[in-house]
Amino acid sequence: LMGIALENRPYVSNSFVQSVFTEKDRGMLKEFSQGLSLFQHVERWLERLKLTEHEDFNFWKAYEAAVEDMLKKDEATIRASLAGLGDDAVDAELKQLDSTRTTFQSLLDANLHREFVDRGVRRFSQKAMLNALFIMLYRDEPLFHVPHMFLQLIMDVEKGFTAWRN
């Protein structure tokens, strides 16, 4: 299964499953639903990767510093270029920038990430999310080209399911 257990699918009733699937297919569906979902397999795979764990270099600290520097420059740009448009325009842009900062911080702060998971904003564990981000950032490197394609294809399938459901 892709990732949502049958009992958590509000649009799939037991009577629907009984009426649409043959006995053999219902048995296979039950067997599959008791195992790990594709989502769980992908999450476990991402968690096993040791992409940024090095004794002499902390990739995420360096990345955090680079992003924080970028966000500070963005804030300076907003204040300088929108100053003539009035306080409301500057405040709206700064609010958006704060939202970006919070989203970024939620990747690196375990407690904030857990809050996002608890609210249903995210599903992956922090380690899986960071490794997926790392793969996305370095997708043009030969080592990460295939993992990136794999993740992109899964996202494309999910988008297709979402469009089909709506």
Image (spheres, grey):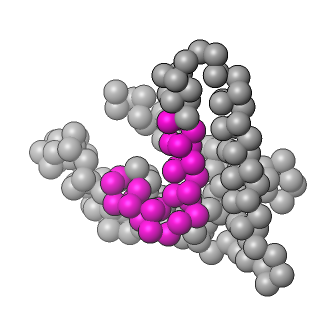
Residue 19's place in the image compared with 6, above or below, is above
As drawn, the residue found furthest toward the bottom would be: 55
Q: Is residue 2 visible?
A: yes
Question: Is 28 placed left or right of 72 in the picture?
Answer: left
Does the image show residue 51?
no
Report the number of numbered marks: 0
In the displayed structure, 81 sits above or below 4; it is above
Residue drawn at x 44%, y 54% as measured from the top left: 122
Q: Is residue 110 magenta?
A: yes
Q: How far across and down, in percent of the image, does residue 8 sit?
A: 24, 53
Q: Residue furthest top?
A: 85
| Residue at (53% x, 66% y) in the render | 109
Using the image, determine if residue 16 lies above or below residue 41. above
Highlighted range, magenta: 95-120
Question: Going 74% across and 50% down the picture, which residue do you hit?
Answer: 69
Q: Residue furthest right?
A: 142
Q: Position of residue 39 (x, y in %)?
A: 47, 58
Report whether 1 appears left or right of 6.
Answer: right
Between residue 76 and residue 68, name the one nearer to us. Answer: 76
Q: Nearer the viewer, residue 137 or 79?
A: 79
Residue 97: image location, x then y, percent: 57, 38
The image shows residue 157 at horizontal and vertical percentages of: 52, 40
Image quadrant in which the N terminus is located: bottom left
Q: Would you say residue 94 sits in the magenta stretch?
A: no
Where 60 sits versus 15, above or below? below
Asked if residue 134 lies left or right of residue 138, the reply is left
Q: Is residue 112 left or right of residue 9?
A: right
Q: Main secondary structure of the magenta part?
A: helix
Closer-to-camera residue (116/71): 71
x 41%, y 56%: residue: 116
